[in-house]
Amino acid sequence: MTEPHPLAEYTAHLRRGQFMIQRSASTGEHVFYPRIAAPGTGEADLEWVPASGLGTVYSTTTVRQKPPAPSYNVALIDLAEGCRMMSRVEGVPPEDIRIGMAVRARITDQDGEPLIVFHPA
Amino acid sequence: MTGFPTGRTAIVGAATFGIGRCPGLEPIDMAARASLLALQDAGLRLSDVDALYTSAPHEALGGLQLAEYLGLQPKITDCNRTGGSAFEIYVAQAALYLDAGLCDVALIAYGNNPSSSTAKHAGMTRPSPYEAPYKPLAPLSSYALATARHMHQYGTTRRQLAEVAVAARAWAALNPEAAMRDPLSIDDVLAARMVSDPLSVRDCCLFNDGAAAAVMTRADRARDLRKPPVHVLGAAAAATHREISSMPDLTRTGAAQSGAAAFAQAGVTPADIDLAMLYDAFTITPILFLEDLGFCAKGEGGAFVQDGAIAPGGRLAVNTNGGGLSCVHPGMYGLFLLVEAVRQLRGEAGARQRPGVELAVAHGNGGVLSSQATLVLGR
């Protein structure tokens, strides 16, 4: 078995245009963020699987900046697979983003790095 | 059998120093000054100290640094990394070491000077690669996310959050040491500049100078010291996550576990408590801790604090020093709330003294609701 490199592999998948998350073979539970072993059980049976990209806003905040710098969204997204991640919802004004809103993932480029963001589904 | 030496150790010295602005001193100078004041308060000498606990703001090896500064060679030295809850955890650990006879006098100290420091510090934490790209304000946006979820799930309102800030300010007005003593109204809080919705600048704690220290010893020795001992009746901790995206339920903190364990050790219930010192980094945190510690049911914290219920003259005395919101919060606040609990239990709290305080809870919070530690203290 080759030693997993969680962050590097996650980022490499994103660079290839794929949003991949981990799943524990023994429990079937999805895991985010990527790790070398399943949290809780410690089983080294995590495999990369494609995320559906579907999610729901679990919580949301609007970060205010001094004008003219625009306010922006920071959200926690519950993925359809059952794990949660921090992200932001784009495509709607930050103050219109609601808890419970259905969203869909997209890979964007931020300062040359691939990054998962969400848009209303 | 809870495993905790209930009532067999006591806090015998407590002090604060340099609250608000403390120009011209380094954090370690401030921690040392508070240490000496707390030892004087106890009627003990520096040379009596054989266990040292501190959480240095900018130095990973801060325990060793403070021991060196004070000229101590402690048997036990610690500088843990559970954020603002570290100090309540130190009390728990010192109680076990003292009771086992592995040390005799434990000193817990802290100081920091964000108001008056001109130095550029590197900071003590590395941003998470899974959160930092989204630019949350650290730690503010994490608490904002918890607040928004509580409002969504339980109907908690910004007005109820404002009650927490207004109560803290009313207590601060009675505390000459508190940094912010001007009147503050619910409308002031509601109209304050938003920082990370739903939190305004008045929902956030201060970031100012301050130092504090506490001294512990075994109860038998405590009886012969200068001040009435404050016994450690229960002490327990729980860690649930580091970053907010990994918190299992943003409306439920580890205080539910730490509180239940500490109350069981002490053999008391929230109904017995005369004073609740609840870490108020943001207005949501006392609401969460009132619920999780069992002062009210889950979701009812907002209603619990309404109508001045935790302000002077209210149904439960909470954060009588003015809290992190209006008294002092130099980055880690856990030791200051502990000192206030000691002062109230001794009857030393001046204009803000509550009559007949026999049992107090001192609850620390660290990280982004990540680490919780509860002490039950009694005369």
Image (spheres, grey):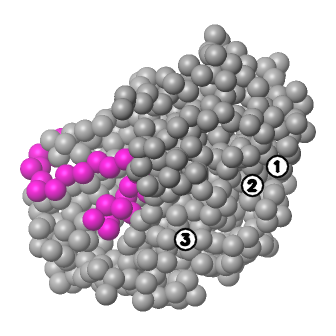
Label 2 chain ID: B
Chain label for disc 3 = B
Amino acid found under the numbered disc labelled 3: Ala
Give the residue at x 81% y 23%: A70
Is label 1 in a helix, a strand or a loop? loop
Assess whether mark 1 and mark 2 are in contact (beta carbons under 8 angstroms).
yes
Residue B302 picture location, percent across and down: 75, 68
Say whether mark 2 and mark 3 are on the same chain.
yes
Q: Nearer the viewer, residue A106 or A110?
A: A106
Judged left or right of residue B229, residue A119 is right
* Quadrant the N terminus of chain A occupies: top left
Please state which amino acid type lies under the numbered disc 1: Ile
Which residue was labeled with disc 1? A99
Question: Could you classify mark 3 by the number of other residues whose Cα lies within 10 Å: few (under 14), some (14-19), or many (20 or more)?
Answer: many
Q: In the image, is residue B72 part of the stretch drawn in magenta?
A: yes
Q: Amino acid at mark 2?
A: Arg
Residue extending furthest toward the top = A112
Q: Which residue is mark 3?
A: B256
Res. B277 in view: no
- Label 2 belongs to which residue? B149
> For this view, does A60 lie left or right of residue B244?
right
